[in-house]
Amino acid sequence: MYKMRKSAQGSSWLDRQAREKFCDMALQITLNGQTREFTELADHASLSTVVGALQLQGDRVAVEHNGEIVSRTEWDRATVRTGDRLEIVHFVGGGNC
């Protein structure tokens, strides 16, 4: 069990052991064949949160999560966990035919 302590200013903070444990809980995935770690995201982030962390515009990308295409309407409900595989394709427009 982790202990909460009070700082001199009165705010709570986790002891060192707890901080180290929580730091190890960063989201680690394979993104387009490359290992990526998101230290700012928990190990169970929504797909929309991951796309936002990548600073991608959701209306211009398609996402495959563990081999399955995920509809944009399902991104908030799709949970990404450490070890998952994402393939993201960014659409680019322009040019003349």
Image: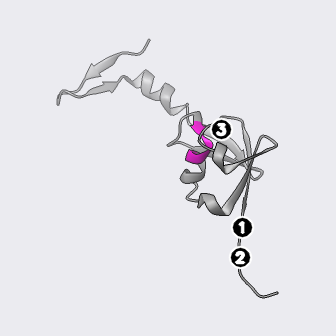
Q: Which residue is mark 1?
A: 91
Q: Nearer the viewer, residue 80 or 25?
A: 80
Contact? badges 3 and 1 (CB < 8 Å)? no
Which residue occupies the extreme top position in the image? 1
Image position, residue 30 (x, y; %) = 72, 45
> What span is in magenta?
45-49
* Magenta-drawn stretch, dominant element (helix, strand or loop): helix
Which residue occupies the extreme bottom position in the image? 96
Which residue occupies the extreme left position in the image? 9
Q: Amino acid at mark 2?
A: Gly
Q: Which residue is mark 2?
A: 93
Q: Earlier in the sequence, mark 3 or mark 1?
A: 3
Image position, residue 88 (x, y; %) = 72, 55
Q: Amino acid at mark 3?
A: Ala
Q: Which residue is mark 3?
A: 78
Contact? badges 2 and 1 (CB < 8 Å)? yes
Q: Quadrant of the N terminus?
A: top left
Say whether residue 55 is magenta: no
Q: Earlier in the sequence, mark 2 or mark 3?
A: 3
Say whether residue 48 is magenta: yes
Q: Secondary structure at mark 1?
A: loop
Q: Is residue 81 left or right of residue 22?
A: right
Q: Which mark is residue 60?
A: none
